[in-house]
């Protein structure tokens, strides 16, 4: 399915709710499926800062999700929500588009790494408080997350240098 945006009418405020046109509608005639190479090319055109890479951004996103879930599983939703809020609301000008709380690059670098390492620690900690099978799964997830963190550190060297210079 494809979705096409329609323009809002000029008198949207005076138009009754039932009379308003739908802002989104299916446009089956112009639909087309994308090949995997076309989809990857579209991902490659992501609007990133010049010091960031697509691979680094994707790995960072995956690590953020893994860390948030790991912290939630082991320490609860309040701890996970606090960690996500701190990393999501803070930023360095020039790194991402929407920043609610501006901090220095060094502080951002510290917070990101603390969040990732807290997620990995949560997986290690969780294995000592679970059954044998779950313990094995926590250990495997912790090793996988640690490998992703190491790969992210290698791929995102340019961004790390940029953050530490701010």
Image (cartoon, rainbow, N blue to C red):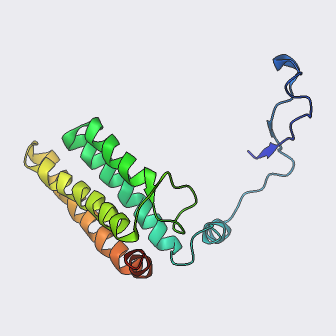
Find residue 35 and report its image quarter. bottom right
Q: Residue, x 81% and y 45% (percent of image)?
A: 4
Side of 116 relative to 129 (left or right): right
Q: How far across and how far down the image is residue 126, in percent?
A: 15, 47
Q: How far across and how far down the image is residue 71, in percent?
A: 25, 47
Find residue 155 and report its image quarter. bottom left
Q: How far across and how far down the image is residue 137, in percent?
A: 20, 52
Q: How far across and how far down the image is residue 91, in percent?
A: 45, 60
Q: Quadrant of the C terminus?
A: bottom left
Q: Is residue 139 above or below residue 159?
A: above
Q: Is residue 11 above or below residue 132?
A: above
Q: Nearer the viewer, residue 34 or 165?
A: 165
Side of 106 relative to 57 (left or right): left
Q: Quadrant of the N terminus?
A: top right
Q: Residue, x 47% and y 65% (percent of image)?
A: 92
Q: Residue, x 63% and y 67% (percent of image)?
A: 47
User: Furthest residue to the right?
Assistant: 10
């Amino acid at each position: 399915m494809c979705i096409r945006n329609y323009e809002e009418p000029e008198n949207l405020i005076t138009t009754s709710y039932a009379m308003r046109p739908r802002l989104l509608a299916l446009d089956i005639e112009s639909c087309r499926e994308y090949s995997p190479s076309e989809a990857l090319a579209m991902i490659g055109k992501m609007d990133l800062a010049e010091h960031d890479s697509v691979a680094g951004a994707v790995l960072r996103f995956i690590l953020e999700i893994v860390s948030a879930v790991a912290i939630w599983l082991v320490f609860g939703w309040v701890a996970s929500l606090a960690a996500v809020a701190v990393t999501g609301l803070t930023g360095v000008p020039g790194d991402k588009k929407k920043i609610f709380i501006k901090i220095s690059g060094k502080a951002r670098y510290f917070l990101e790494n603390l969040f990732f390492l807290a997620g990995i620690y949560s997986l290690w900690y969780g294995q000592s408080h679970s059954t044998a099978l779950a313990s094995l799964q926590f250990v495997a997830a912790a090793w996988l997350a640690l490998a992703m963190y190491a790969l992210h550190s290698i791929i995102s060297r340019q961004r790390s240098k940029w953050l530490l210079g701010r």
